[in-house]
Amino acid sequence: MALKRMDNVGIVVDDLGSAIAFFVELGMELEGEALVEGPDVDRLVALDGVRCDIAMVRTPDGHSRLELMSFRSPTATTTEPGAPTNTPGIRRVMFAVDDIQDTLARLRAYGAEPVGDVVRFGGHLLCNVRGPEGILVALAEDDGAEMVAVAT
């Protein structure tokens, strides 16, 4: 049996509306929203009394999705917004964009703050921004330059 595909990446947020608005402004499309709850959900996530609002957003090509989740209950016991990029665990989600400067300007209206600088690296312009609730989003624009091989 082989892996077929990656369906989505889940991100837990407190303000689902702000997260949806941010990712829609980035260029993702809202597929739908739902409230999930009940014994099967409790068993699936190993928590009791789950009530969770979810939204699925997808890239325009339809190949990548984020599942945005906001738990009404139970209350989270820990948080780590704004964790440094070298903290173990999932740290960022990267998106290819047409115009990195335009994307940055549009996302600033939704609370995005640059982390570091826009850097030319390996045939791309790259940058990281903190989105809603500290979500680290990387942006990559193909700059048309020839890729440079890095010796190992």
Image (cartoon, rainbow, N blue to C red):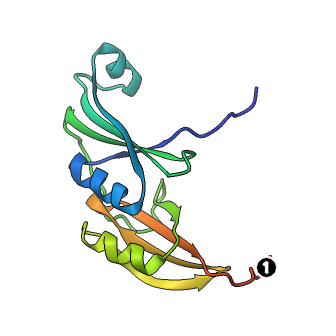
Tell me the residue at 28%/48% (across/down).
13
Residue 29, position as x, y percentages in the image: 41, 48
Residue identified by numbered label 1:
149
Q: Quadrant of the N terminus?
A: top right
Question: Does residue 71 sit above or below 127 in this rendering?
Answer: above
Q: Foreground: 9 or 86?
A: 9
Question: Eyeballing the image, is 66 above or below 41?
Answer: below
- Residue at image point 31% right, 36% down: 54
Label 1 environment density (alpha carbons within 10 Å; few <14, some 14–19, many ≥20): few
Residue furthest to the top in view is 39
Q: Is residue 83 above or below residue 18?
A: below
Query: Residue 37 is drawn in which quadrant?
Result: top left
Amino acid found under the numbered disc labelled 1:
Ala
Q: Nearer the viewer, residue 60 or 44?
A: 60
Q: Secondary structure at mark 1?
A: loop
Q: Please give the count of numbered marks on the rendered protein.
A: 1
The quadrant in which residue 73 appears is: top left
Compared across the picture, whether 142 is left or right of 69 comes to right
Q: In the visual, does 67 lie left or right of 35?
A: right
Left or right: residue 107 compared with residue 95: left
Q: Is 47 rendered above or below residue 53? A: above
| Percent coordinates x, y for residue 15 in the rendering | 21, 49
**Quadrant of the image containing the C terminus:** bottom right
Q: Position of residue 33 (x, y in %)?
A: 30, 35
Residue at figure coordinates x 56%, y 74% from the top left:
141
- The residue at the point 58 percent across, 85 percent down is 120
